[in-house]
Amino acid sequence: MKKLPQLICLLLLFISFSSLAQTTKSSKIDVNKDVDIVKVYEQLAMEGYGTPRIYKELANAYYFKNEYKKAKKWFEQLFKLQKPLDATLKHRYRQTLKALNIAHANNEYLAVVKLD
């Protein structure tokens, strides 16, 4: 009978340790946490591996960061490879030119082609 309270205490001690062991978090390292994708895309473009998707991502990234000179550069790289058919991209490019005080009336990428 004297061992029963000791066994109960020992059992409660083991239960508390096992519950504490289950609540601790394992610290995983996220290797993508500190990667700046804009820098990676820019490096790819500078090395000659630029694609329309990369140019579009760079243009949009710099547009939303309010770095309009860089955004203009990447919009024009994109438009050299493919015609600007997306209205959103045209609008962002127009706004970029407006922010840089560049007239967009006779811009070759924003010219409207009329078929009569």
Image (spheres, helix red, strand yellow):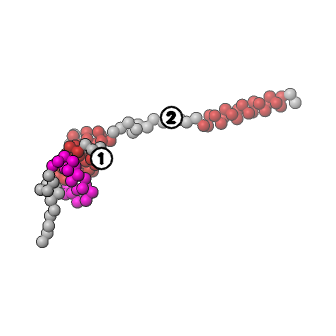
Residue 97: percent from left, percent from top:
19, 50
Q: Is residue 74 visible?
A: no
- Determine which of the numbered discs, if any, sits on residue 27 in the image: 2
Give the extent of the magenta segment. Answer: 82-102
Q: Residues within 10 Å of mark 1 (few under 14, many from 20)?
A: few
Residue 96: percent from left, percent from top:
22, 49
The residue tagged 1 is 64
User: Of marks 2 and 1, which one's residue comes earlier in the chain?
Assistant: 2
Locate the C terminus by quadrant. Answer: bottom left
Relative depth, front residue between 83 and 91: 91
Identify which residue is drawn at 24% across, 56% down: 91
Amino acid at the residue labelled 2: Ser
- Tell me where residue 35 sits by quadrant: top left
Identify which residue is drawn at 61% across, 37% down: 22
Residue 54: percent from left, percent from top:
27, 47
Q: CA distance from mark 2 to mark 1?
A: 33 Å
Which secondary structure lies at badge 1?
helix
